[in-house]
Amino acid sequence: LSGTTRSIVSTFAHDLKSALAETGGADDVAVLREEPSNAETDATSGARYLRLRNLSAVRVPEEHIARETPVDADGVPQVGVAVAKWSPDERYVATLHFGMPTSVWIWDLGRVCLSALLLHRSAVKSLAWGPCTAPSTLASRLAISTS
């Protein structure tokens, strides 16, 4: 949404095939899947991810897609984007979609396209960007909490 004209500037499709088409190619999108880890090292090393190379074969596993539309306390269906968090340097926005609670979509706001898709083993409960203190490629870090 444009801050000046209040018109739609862009929409982000939470569908990998559509997002890849908008990006212009699979080479520009990082799709990472959380791998099973050793319980002894979980507390110190964090999650381990495998980069998926053949994106045409990437599917969000059936068990990671909500079978029923979630409803809130008032019985209202929850559809669309559940959470949107902007990075402190305003280069990225990370989103969670109600229909895919295990997937984090990271959008590049400069190019207006999908930058990364993170596929987790369990539902994502929250996410937060780390503070940005210096302009660098490491400035945008995302912390993710899963169940």
Image (cartoon, rainbow, N blue to C red):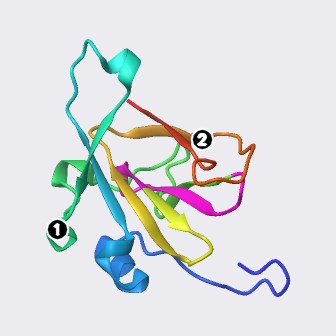
At 38% from the left and 73% from the top, the residue drawn is 28
Predominant SS along the magenta part? strand
Residue with the most extreme right position: 4
Q: In terms of image quadrants, where is residue 22? A: bottom left
Q: Are marks 2 and 1 in contact (CB under 8 Å)?
A: no
At label 1, which amino acid type do we have? Asn
Residue for badge 2: 128
At 82% from the left and 87% from the top, the residue drawn is 5
Q: Is residue 10 magenta?
A: no
Residue for badge 1: 54
Quadrant of the frame with the C terminus: top left
Residue 56, compared with residue 83, is above or below; it is below
Where's residue 50, x and y in %? 24, 47
Quadrant of the frame with the N terminus: bottom right
Which residues are the magenta region?
Answer: 88-104
At label 2, which amino acid type do we have? Ala
Local secondary structure at mark 1:
loop
